[in-house]
């Protein structure tokens, strides 16, 4: 072969390589490059960690849904000097009549740390769509907050969820929370996809950082429910210091209404809220066949009535579709167990965290594989959920900016930045989703999509996405 022949072969080869790279590459990897600087945890004397004034003042106030249908709220807070009162006083905005609910107090030790008095009180039989004030504490040190109950569960009730994951307590975390608060699309409830305080990054998992985290986020979670998912940073498993009971700090501090959905563990449960049915799963609890979580989910999915709650949303920590080298394939075994059910029951969207970056998938499934048939590539599937990784809250571990190349076809958009998202349900057929980066203006959306409900409007909605 002459020189020109060689050049020709090389050119064809190059074209083939280029072409296959184009074919293999699915969506887009954002060209936006965020400064890769770890921001440290905010120091203990930061404004966001201030202890409220007054003797034994309630601190770390937080609320979450308290039943299956949105007519109850769990109010939690911590008192440090003494147990104080267990009572929550509450009243509807337009009523002078004050009600009382009595809660319970708990405490725990973690190595050489002893918690304050942790109070949990469930307020029941609330009216839907009503603003309530509530007061905790006694004597001269009471504190008053408020929340609005969701509208009655129904198929066309508009409702806006915020999405936050892997938050931690750095300057970036504070920026994420501020962006959520200042977002012109007002979130009414946060779906939190796990990894709260990152206290376990400190020597002996210094649980003081669980307290500071709860004071930091109080400015949001005392006024609107955050729906909790457990992540790996909630495990606090530390046999080297004698701490062998997983999830000890998390389960003492954060109560969820798991019994209302007939779950036997606070780590997996479900709620209905407005037009959504939210299922929370635990990536760090057993989910193999015959396990409690498996059996619960098997019985749970057929109960979802899409005529009542059209939007079926799943929260879990470790993503099933993640094209980042960071935590690559960690969600795989759970995907193998549960993905056929998600397709069968037409889950609309799965939100996960864990990976400290942002990614949105196409509607894909990977359920044909049976070990011997070699069919192991995700395929487009209009019955499948969209998978969104929103583990970009901004914790101390920094960004996950090492992505697999080429971008797999299932991946629609990915970017290593910090931020949050909103899922804005309009009616039974449409929901508007938007992802926000921290370094942009509060109103700027860096990735958006109109979701078409999988039960009522199962069209191909991927074309509505804009990044
Ligand atoms: C716990 O032990 C560590 C060292 O093991 C020490 O630095 C810390 O001050 C102790 N904390 C308390 C509350 O005793
Ligand atoms: C956190 O953000 C809030 C609201 O933007 C601000 O008032 C506060 O000073 C910030 N704190 C720190 C330590 O950055
Ligand atoms: C829980 O189980 C009880 C008894 O079987 C049943 O009446 C109730 O409807 C179940 N609740 C949910 C939310 O599935
Ligand atoms: C599903 O919900 C609709 C609307 O609330 C109701 O009419 C219907 O009876 C429910 N179906 C079942 C099987 O409960
Ligand atoms: C990215 O991840 C791959 C696979 O784990 C690793 O080989 C490579 O060194 C990483 N690159 C960087 C820049 O960290
Ligand atoms: C549902 O909401 C979408 C988006 O706002 C709107 O275009 C559509 O007309 C609504 N459907 C109904 C039945 O109102
Ligand atoms: Fe995680």
Image: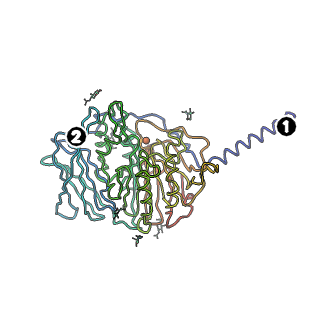
Labels in figure, total: 2
Residue 400 as seen in the image, left or right of residue 111: right
Q: Position of residue 434 (x, y in %)?
A: 46, 53
Q: Image point 23% across, 47% down: which residue?
A: 119
Q: Indicate left or right for 226 with 145 as reference.
A: right
User: Is residue 380 toward the left or the right of residue 453 in the image?
Assistant: right
Q: Which mark is residue 5?
A: 1
Taking depth in this image into account, of 257 and 371 the one nearest to the observer is 371
Q: Quadrant of residue 111?
A: top left
Q: Is residue 11 left or right of residue 141?
A: right
N-terminal label among 1 and 2 = 1
* Residue 402 screen position, x and y as percent: 54, 37
Image coordinates of residue 141 in percent, x first then y, are 15, 46
Residue toward you, 329 or 147: 329
Q: Residue 107, how many percent across, how many down?
A: 23, 42
Query: How was this image coloured?
Result: rainbow
* Disc 1/disc 2 C-alpha distance (Å): 79 Å
**Residue at the outermost left position:** 139
Q: Name the residue: 32% across, 49% down.
A: 220
Say few, some or many: other residues with alpha carbon within 10 Å of mark 1 (under 14 / 14 to 19 / 20 or more).
Answer: few
Asked if ligand 1 lies within 8 A of label 2, the reply is: no
Name above or below for residue 128 compared with residue 226. below
Identify the residue position indicated by label 2 in the image.
Answer: 116
Mark 1–mark 2 CB contact (< 8 Å): no
Residue 161 vs residue 206, the one in the foreground: 206
Q: For the residue labelled by badge 2, is the local secondary structure a helix, a strand or a loop?
A: loop
Instruction: Name the element at disc 1.
Output: helix
């Amino acid at each position: 072969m002459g020189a020109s022949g060689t050049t020709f072969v090389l050119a064809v080869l190059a074209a083939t390589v280029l072409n296959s790279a184009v074919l293999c590459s699915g969506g887009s990897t954002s060209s936006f490059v965020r400064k890769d600087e770890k921001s440290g945890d905010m120091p203990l004397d930061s404004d966001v960690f201030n202890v409220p004034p007054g003797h034994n003042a309630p601190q770390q106030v937080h609320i979450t849904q308290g039943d299956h249908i949105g007519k109850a709220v769990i109010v939690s807070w911590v008192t440090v000097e003494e147990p104080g009162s267990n009572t929550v006083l509450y009243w509807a905005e337009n009523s002078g009549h004050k009600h009382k609910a009595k809660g319970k107090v708990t405490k725990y030790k973690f190595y050489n740390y002893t918690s304050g008095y942790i109070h949990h009180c469930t307020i029941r039989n609330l009216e839907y769509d009503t603003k309530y004030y509530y007061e905790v504490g006694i004597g001269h040190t009471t504190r008053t907050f408020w929340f609005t109950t969701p509208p009655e569960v129904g198929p066309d009730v508009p409702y806006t969820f915020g999405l936050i994951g892997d938050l931690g307590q750095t300057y970036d975390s504070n920026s994420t929370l501020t962006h959520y608060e200042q977002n012109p699309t007002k979130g009414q409830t946060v779906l939190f996809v796990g990894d709260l305080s990152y206290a376990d990054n400190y020597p002996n998992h210094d649980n003081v950082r669980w307290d500071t985290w709860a004071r930091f986020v109080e400015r949001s979670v005392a006024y609107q429910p955050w729906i909790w998912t457990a992540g790996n940073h909630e495990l606090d498993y530390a046999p080297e210091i004698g701490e062998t009971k997983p999830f000890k700090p998390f389960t003492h501090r954060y109560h969820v209404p798991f019994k209302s959905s007939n779950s036997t563990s606070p780590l997996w449960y479900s709620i209905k809220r407005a037009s959504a049915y939210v299922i929370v799963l635990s990536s760090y609890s057993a989910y193999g066949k015959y396990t409690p979580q498996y059996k619960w989910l098997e019985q749970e999915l057929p109960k979802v009535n899409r005529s009542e709650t059209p939007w079926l949303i799943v929260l879990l920590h470790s993503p099933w579709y993640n094209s980042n080298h960071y935590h690559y394939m960690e969600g795989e075994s759970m995907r193998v167990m549960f993905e056929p059910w998600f397709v069968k029951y037409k889950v609309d969207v799965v939100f996960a965290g864990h990976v400290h970056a942002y990614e949105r998938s196409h509607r894909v499934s990977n359920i044909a594989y049976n070990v011997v048939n070699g069919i192991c590539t995700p395929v487009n599937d209009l019955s499948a959920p969209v998978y969104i990784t929103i583990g970009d809250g901004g914790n101390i571990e920094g960004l996950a900016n090492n992505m697999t190349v080429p971008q797999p076809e299932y991946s629609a958009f990915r970017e290593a930045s910090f931020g949050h998202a909103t899922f804005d349900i309009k009616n039974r057929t449409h929901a508007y989703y938007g992802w926000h980066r921290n370094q942009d203006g509060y109103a700027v959306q860096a990735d958006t999509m109109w979701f078409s409900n999988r039960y009522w409007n199962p069209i191909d909605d991927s074309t509505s996405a804009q990044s």
